[in-house]
Image: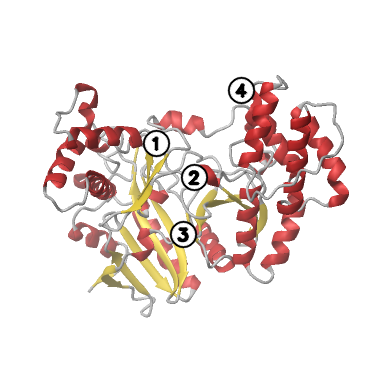
Amino acid sequence: MQTIYRIVDELIDYAQKNLGLDARNEVYARNAVLNALGISSYGEKSDAVSSALTPEDILLRLKNECVSHKIFEESDAAARLDAVMGALSYSPAEVDVVFNDMAKKSTATATEWLYDYCVKNDYVKKSQLDKNPRFDTSNGLTITINKAKPEFRDPKKAAAGNSVAGGYPKCAICRENEGYCGRNKRTLRTVSIKLNGKNWFWQFSPYGYFYQHGIAVNCEHTPMRIDKTALENLIDFADKFPHYFIGCNAPLPRIGGSVLAHDHYQGGGEVLPLHKAKIKKYIKDSKYPYLRVGVLDWPGTVIRVISDKRNEVVEVSERIRAAWEVYDAPELGIISKDESGLHNAISPTVIKSPHGYEMNVILRSNATSDEYPDGIFHAHPEFHVIKKESIGLIEAQGLFILPGRLEEELAEIERLIVDKKPLPPEYAAFKLVYDETFILYKSGKFKDISAAMREELGSICYRILENTAVFKHEKDLYAFLTKAGFEIG
C-alpha cells in the first residue's frame, strides 16, 4: 500500500502544479482521492513530486497498483480514475471565473487555457488523439484514422450510441453531464457563454477530430434547428471567438450528428480544407450589391456569402436556406418533403477573415431511393468499406474521419500489392481500393506503397464528397440560385 500512497502524493503534487489545487486544500483533496479509490487508510506523507505535464502515466501506475492490491477490478478502473481526477479539478464555477477573467483581455487566451486545463485534468484524451494517423492529400483534403472511438455503421445504432438511457441527463450533451458519474463525466468542465442574448455553454470534445474541437450547446434541451436565429447565433459566436470557426450539422438523420435532440454547434481552432477553397463563380444579389456571393470550387455544393456587415450575411444566407428547404427537382433525386418528413437542409459554417464574415452554406439532402437506401447524397455503396458513417459537418468541410479498423486492413492491402498477391475472399469488399492502389503503385509516381494508398484514400474521399453534392452540374445549381433570387453573371 505504501506504493499507492506515494502515487497519490505524486498526484496531489501534480494537481498543485497543473490544476490549480491550493495548498490549503491538500489534505481535503487527498482524502477525496482516497475516497474515490475506495481506500480508508493512509500512511505518512511522502516526498513524492511530479514533473509530468499530463496525468496519464501517474494514473496508469495508480490503476495497476490498485488492481494488483484488489482495491478495485480492472473493469471499474475508468470510473475510479475519473472520480479521482474530478476530485482534483476546479469546480465549474471556478473554471468560469478563470475563463471569464482571461476572456476580458483575449478569448483566444481563455480558450487556450481551458483546452490545456481539460487535457491536464484528463477530460480531453490528447495522448490518444495524437496516435491517430493523419495526413493531407494532394487534392486538398485532410484524412485521419480514428482509433479512439468505435465505428457506427448503422444510423439507428449511431443515434442510440450517443444518447443517454433514462431521464437524467436528458441527452449526452446536456449541461447536467458536468460531473455526472453515469458517463464518467466527473472531469467535464464547461464555460458559460451568451449567443444572441441566450444562455449557451462551450465545452471541448474528449475525442476531438481537430485542434481544440469543441461544441457550443444551448442550455435549454431543445431540438437542433437551423433558421435565421441559428445563423445569428453563429455570427455572434464568431464575434466572440474570432480565432475559431463555428458551424452546424444539418438537423436531419443520416447527414448530421447523432445528437439531434439538443441544439448545438461544432467548432474549433483549425483551418479546415473548405475554408481554403476559392470561389469559382460569383453571383449577384440586387438587394446587397456590394455583398460578395459565390459558388465554391468544391466537390460538394457550397455557396459562400462574404461581408463585413453581419446582417447582410444573415439575410442572404437565410434566403438560401429558405429556398433550399422547399426546393424540388425529382429528376435529380431532390425531394424536399414526402411522407417520411423533410429532406432538405443546410450545414452553415462561418469564419471571420480579413474580408469580414465568411458564411459557407452547404446544401444537404438525406433523400433515399431503392438504389441508394442509405442516401442518394451519401457515400455510395462502393465506398462504404472506407466510410459508411454519416458525412456530417466536419467531413463536408474536407476533414475525413475514417474508422480505426482501416489501419490494419489497409496495411494488409498494401502487403498484398507489394507481394503481388491476389485479394483473398475475406477482403472482397476492398476490390476497388486494391485495384486502384495497385495501378497507382505500379505507375512509379509514388515513393512507396503507403504514399500510393494515401493518394487512393484522398481520391475516394473526394468522390464521397461528390456523392454528397446535391447538384452535379452547374446549370442545375444556377437554376436553383436563380429561383432563390440571385443573378447569374
Identity of the residue drawn at 84% across and 36% down? 31
Distance between mark 2 and mark 3 Cα atoms? 15 Å
Residue 387 visible to an observer of this rendering = yes
Which amino acid type corresponds to the residue marked 3 in the rendered image? Glu
Q: Secondary structure at mark 2?
A: helix
Identity of the residue drawn at 64% across and 59% down? 113
Disc 4 designates what residue?
75
Q: Are marks 4 and 1 in contact (CB under 8 Å)?
A: no
Disc 2 designates what residue?
129
Residue 320 visible to an observer of this rendering = no
Depth check, front residue: 73 or 146: 73
Which amino acid type corresponds to the residue marked 1 in the rendered image? Gly
Q: Bin the neighbour count of mark 1 within 10 Å (Cα to Cα): few under 14, some 14-19, many 20 and up.
A: some
Camera-near label (4 vs 3) is 4
Distance between mark 4 and mark 1 Cα atoms? 23 Å
x%, y% of residue 421? 15, 29
Depth check, front residue: 448 or 380: 448
In the picture, measured across the screen, residue 433 lies left or right of residue 82, that is: left
Q: Are marks 4 and 3 in contact (CB under 8 Å)?
A: no
Q: Secondary structure at mark 1?
A: loop
Disc 3 designates what residue?
270
Depth check, front residue: 220 or 114: 114
Which amino acid type corresponds to the residue marked 2 in the rendered image? Leu
Disc 1 designates what residue?
404
